[in-house]
Each structure stands twice: as structure tokens, then as C-alpha cells.
Image: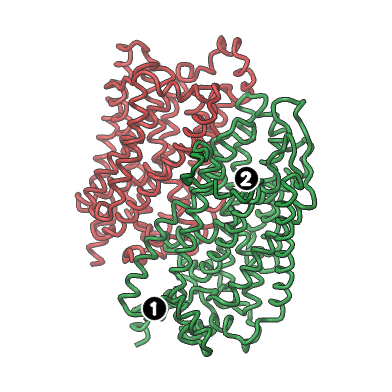
Chain colours: A green, B red
Amino acid sequence: MATTAVQEIDNTSNDASRRPTLITGDLDFKGITETVCGVAEAPSAPKIWYYLMAISVLALMNLFAMIGYLITVGTGVWGLNNPVGWGWAIVNFVFWVGIGHAGTLISAILFLFRQKWRTSINRFAEAMTIFAVMCAGLFPGIHVGRVWVVYWMFPIPNYLNMWPQFRSPLLWDVFAVSTYATVSILFWYVGMIPDLATFRDRAKDKIRKFAYGILSLGWRGSSRHWSNYEWSYLLLAALATPLVLSVHSIVSFDFAVSQLPGWHTTIFPPYFVAGAIFSGFAMVITLAIPARKMFHLENIITIRHLDIMNRIILATGSMVGYAYIIEFFIAWYSGNAYETFAFINRAYGPYWWAYWTMFTCNVIIPQVFWIKKFRTSPMLMFIISIFVNIGMWFERFVITITSLSRDFLPANWGYYTPTFVDVLTFVGSFGLFLTLFLLFCRFLPIVAMAEVKAILPEAHAHHHEEDH
Amino acid sequence: MADKLDSQTISLGPIGPALLKIGVIVGIIGLAAAFMGSYTTELKSERFYLSYLVNFAFYLSLSIGALFFILTQHIGRAGWSVVVRRVAEAFAANVALMFVLFGVIFIGMGEIYSWTDPDRLAHDTILQGKEPYLNTPFFLVRILIYFGVWILLTQYFLKGSVGQDSSKDPKKTEKMQMVSAPGIPITALTVTFASFDLLMSRDPHWFSTIFGVYYFAGSFLAFFSLMAIFFCVIQSKGLLKDAITVEHYHDIGKYMFGFTVFWAYIAFSQFMLIWYGNIPEETVWYIRRFEGGWETASYFLLVGHFIIPFIVLINRFVKRIPALLATIAFWILLVHWFDLYWIVMPESLKGHVGISWIDIACFIGMGGLYLAGFAFFMGDKALIPQGDPRLEESLHFKNA
């Protein structure tokens, strides 16, 4: 890539008398096309990309190995036993589904809220969403034991006349997550069509021309194409908006419809949604910081974009903190001995270390985002986003494991320990996630060029009036 | 244009003092009639106090909704909403009036909240466990804290915004944006615990972690509905005609639609999880609301608070015709009021819904005082924040 390292420009401005610029470095329409297309058109990717790819593929192979081992030997290779029948697989499932929330929130909800800054980050946040949902879908799929009949999760008419349990939230999950995956992929792909056409038009060799030509569905950029495109985008945004809330609400039902103390509480749906957005944005930061450096996108994904995302992390982290406080208070206020015990046990029982890791990473550490320095320094926010990722994984661990390990009868209590297969499968899911993400960065438009151009000052009629 | 705009936005004009006078008279008559009328009922004065609590929660929710509106608009650096924000600031400042009106609840506490009864406490072990929280002195301290916080915040935003009318200082906006950030978690926590104290503790055994969010959802929805009605009425009096356009109504309508769905989402989450868990100590609250006449009332809430506004507000044209929007907004306010009635009453009115003229008199009476309070806080202040740096953006705002 010809571009040299780009200077960081602080375009976060608190000045209320004018709207700060979103795109820096005097990038015009052509500049944006060149920068974004340059990522995929460069004859070779940056060296670091190859290193990361090698590590990711290695982790991915390990995932395949672990799944193979699991299927041949059985779920006994995991640390599951009585009383903890839901271990890392469910924790990982909820963790990945949560991460898969930022993309659609950015693309759909922020679109409806007219948040222009979303345009620089929506594309790769959506891609990340889809890959995260894939990782999530993996875990319940391999958890069923007999993987070869996993399609029984869907209500398919069959000769056994056997149906899934419609009253189970696990089945609702199948519907919720598959709907979400479908709509997210559609939304991502529809949004990408104009940019794929740009790739096609700039392609030099036949293979690229053919591949991008097929993918761009005959896009010619006529005004009728644009009109249809914008309508479908708006409709998909409206359809995706309730999905952002519904998916994690239904995931929370997996726990909350039960009668288990620590699981059965009415705040779970909105609390899970807030946590999902929180973890999703943290993952966006985790990926955005290296990606913008690696591909020299600092003028498109600017400090201001990062600043706003960190504010959202602060807000959603505080919502999660709110839920922790209210849960704890009501556990006491309810006067229910089991409920009170479940919470005391979380904080001071055998899993106290998990609880306090969760609390520190999710509630205390993100509070540093009140300080501007932390919101605008890529290095610092990267570190904090890692803490949030850790914290949100531990949140699901705390919820799943502590409540199961000590329920109503002390005779049933136990202590859960994961096996190496649990750990390596989780590591492997990162391999899947990062491999797909790295491929995406290299071969697809990483930034929504057409949308970014539409928010440049040049795109508005007034701009020229002022000039002349 | 500018002169015309000025004459429409300079102040409430003669409407203000008239509203103040009529409001106070209606208020005194309404509340006095409700109080005296209550002695004709079975429950005697308890009937009045309960009705008073329903209406108190209702008008408080409007001010709480207004405060959340101001906070969220500042934190989001919103441009579209500048022209509607002054009215919100005055409605939010009305929490000070609500604090005064709390006095009656203080007097009637013994009849409203069964946990204040020493006899019950002596025999009720669950209640004894909660006594460190549910006791009169601590309850009053908490109420003082809630209202103290709300009055400070609402006065800060009203004064700051009015001061900016003359100073035109954009720095003031930056300052208010900064205050709004900690303002949100503080308000969220105080509103949550206030809803626990004022409403949830009506059944002191029952608990629901989502209850605060439920009250917030209704409050936010109710405030947007109030705005739609208020602007429609005030524009018919010739005020704000050019400042607030169909585009602003459209955005208010979108929020009404969004929070209709949000309310339903929260209400469903609470109901479904309790129903599915089927644990007696939680279901007791809903069973009471599904017995006798209350069953119909519960289904009515589903239809009236969710399905009807959903079907009406999903249409674009409804949001862009002020009279239509105000009509559905009026409906939403009524069902929101009924939602609170449905929360407060079944513990005392078992087996029958029994809305009586006392509730209506109380509703109108407190409404009179509430509007008078609004007129008081509005005074001769400008109807739009004239000094806001984003005023132009708001005046020319269009839904793309």
C-alpha cells in the first residue's frame, strides 16, 4: 500500500456553535474511494495481516480438532456434570450473541436516529456481528450431543411425528438467532452493493471483475437503483431495530423463565440487551483500533468516532451496573432466603473471583471513560475494551455457573471446573471469528464508501452555495 | 419572518395568568370535591388518598418524562428538539409543585401503605425483614432525596436555558451537556427507587426488578404525548406557529411509537417471566389483576396501551397531522393514567375496577394545579430557547 502512516487528528470538539467534522485529512469523494479500495486492491496485505491470519487459522484448526474430539467422544469431554449442566458452551454462546449486537444497533437504530457518524464504522461492525453470530450458533449446535440430528432443533415435519418443545425458550432462541442472522446478513449485503460495484468497476483482473460483478447484482448507480436501494435500506433498518432488542431478550429468557434463584428475575431482558450492546461496542473498539492502523483508515474512523463509541460503552456499562445494583437490592428486598443467598453466594461464595472480575471489568473500569483522555487515546481505549470483553464473558459465567452450582439443596452443591477441551474450544471460536474478519478486511469494502460520501459537506447543496 | 417568529415565541402572553388563575380554582374545587366525595364510599378517605396517589404518579410521570427528555437531548447534542425544549423545561420544573403535592400523600400514608401499620408489622415476618427499608422515617428521607435531586436538576436546566436567551452563550449549552451526563444515572436511580416506594410498596410483599424501568417507559411515553397535545393546542392560539412544524410533530410521533413498543416490551417481560415462573410470591400481584373485573382491565391495557397506539402510530400520515397525533396522544395519556390506576388500586378494590367520579375529579383537580404550576414556571419566559446555538438547525429541521 502506497499510503504512509496517517497522523492522528483530534476532531472531537465540544463547541456547541458548530457541528464538528467527521472525516478528517481533507478527504474528498475520490480520497475516500482510494483509501477504502486501496485496502482490497493492494497487491499484498500488510505483513501483520499475514501473521494474524496464521495465528487465527491455527486457532481455527484447533476448533475443528476440538469439535471432532467432542463428537467422537461425547460431551463428557467438557467439564459438565451434576449440578452444572450448562458450562462454557452456553457462556460462550451468550458471549458471542452479545457481541453480535453492536453491528445491527449501529446500522439500524443509529440510522433511524440520524446519527451520521455511524457511516464510518457500520460496515465492519455489521461484518463483525455476522461472524459473532456464527460463533454463537456453533455452541448450542455442538452442545446437543448427537450433532448429526441437530436439525431436529427446527420444527420440521418428520416420520416420528416428533416436535421440538415449543414452550422452551431454547427453541425460541433457534428462531430468534436464525432470524437475526438472516436479517443481519441481508442488511449487510444490501448495504454493500454500491461499494461492491465500485470494486467491480475498478477491478483490473478478470477474476476480480467476475466475482465482484456477480456480487454487485448489476448495480449501475442509476437514480432508480439508488431510490430502490434507499427504500430497502430504510425498511431493513426498521425491521432490524426490534431484532436488536428481541434476540438478547430471548437469550435472557433461557435463564429467566426458570425458577432458579439468580436466573429468575424480571429485569433480565433489558439488562441483557444493554449488556449485549456494551460488549458489542467493546469488540468494535477492540477490532477498530488495530484495523484502522493496519489499513491507514485514521481519517475515516476518526478519534471522534472512537470518542462517541466510548461514550456508548460508558452508558451501557452503567446500565449493566444499574441492573447489578437493582438485582442485589431486590434479592434482599424480596425477603426470599434463596434469592438473597444466590447473590451473597455470587459475591462471597466459591466463585467470588469471577463475580468481582465481572464487576470490576464491567462497572468500575469503564468509568474512566468519564475522562476525555481515555476516550480519545487509541491505546488506552483498546486496553479498556479488552477488560470489557473479559468482564462480559465473566458476567455470563457468573450467571450460568454460580446459580447452577448451588441451588436449593446443599446436598446437590458442586464446583464446576472446565476441561482443556472447554478452554481450547473457546479459543478456537476466536480463530473462526478472526479468520472471517481478516478475510473480510482483505476482500470486501471495509468502510461503507457510498454512505461516508453522503455525509461529506460536498454532498449537500448548501456547500456549493457557500462556495460561490 | 423574524418579527412574526418573535411575536409567536416571546411568551405565553395573556394565556399564562389565565391558566394560573383557572388552574388553581379548578384544582382546589376538584380536589376538595374528591376528598369530600370519598366519604360517601365504602373505603371513606382511603378512596381519596388512593385516587390521589394514582394522579400523583400520573402527573409526576409527566415531569419525570420531561426531565429525561431534556437530559437525553442534551447528551445526544440533539438539533431537532431545540424548539420544543423550553416547554419541556417548564414541565420538568413542575416537580417542585409535585413535591408540595406530596404533602397529601404524607398525610394519607397510613391509609395508602399497609407496611406503615404496626399491627401488620408485628405479625408479618416478611415485612419485619424489610423494615430497615420500609419504615416511615427512611421513606420520607428518600422522598426528600428524590425530590431534592429532581428539583436541583430541573431548576438548573430551566435557569440555564433561560439565562442563555439573553446571553446567547454557546458555552452554556456545553455546560448543560456536561451536567446531563451524570444527570442521567442519578435520575435513573432516583426514579427507580421512587417507583418502588410510591407504587410497588403498595403490596409490600411483592417485588419486580424491572418495575423502575416500567414506570420510566410509561413516563417517557406520556411526556411525548403531552407535548403533542400541548403544541397542537398552543398553536391553535396562534403561538409557536412557525417555530414548530410538522417535522417536529413527526419526530415526537416517532418517539411515541417507539416508546409504545418499549412499554409493551417491558410490560410483557415482567408479565411473561412471572407467569412462566409461576412462583406464588410473585404471581399473587398478577392474580389480583386477573380476578373479578380486573381481568377485563388487564386485557384492556394490552389493547389500549399497546395494540391501538401501535396500529395508529405506525402510519406516517398520522404523525404528520397534528390534530390526529394529538388525538392519539390524548388516548395514550388516558391509558397511561389507567395503567397507574391498575397498578395502585387492585390491592384495595378487590374484585371490581370501580373507577368513580372521585378519580375524575381528582384527575381534573390535580391537572388544574399541574397546568397552573406550568404557567407559573413558564411565567413570561420565551417559549423557545432563543439563545441556543442549535436553534437555527431546529427551526429548519426536516425529516429526510
User: Toward the viewer: B118 or A139?
Assistant: A139
Residue bearing the label numbered 1: A219
Q: Give the mark toward the camera: 2 or 1.
A: 1
Q: Is residue B217 left or right of residue A121?
A: left
Q: Chain under label 2?
A: A
Q: What is the quadrant of the C terminus of chain A in the image?
A: bottom left
Q: Chain under label 1?
A: A
Residue A356, placed above or below residue B291: below
Q: Identify the residue at image location x=63%, y=17%.
A: B128
Q: In this orientation, does residue B148 appear?
A: no
Label 1 sits on a secondary structure element that is loop
Could you tell me residue A105's position as x and y percent? 50, 58
Residue type at mark 1: give it. Answer: Trp
User: Toward the viewer: B76 or A223?
Assistant: A223
Q: Identify the residue at image location x=59%, y=43%.
A: A322
Could you tell me residue B181's position as x and y percent? 55, 53
Could you tell me residue A150's position as x and y percent? 58, 49
Residue bearing the label numbered 2: A321
| Residue furthest front as drawn | A159
Residue B254, placed above or below residue A82: below
Residue type at mark 2: give it. Answer: Gly
Q: Is residue B292 left or right of residue B193?
A: left
Q: Residues within 10 Å of mark 2 (few under 14, many from 20)?
A: some
Residue A451, image quadrant: bottom left
Q: Is residue A286 left or right of residue B364?
A: right
Residue A303, placed above or below residue A342: below
User: Toward the viewer: B233 or A399?
Assistant: A399
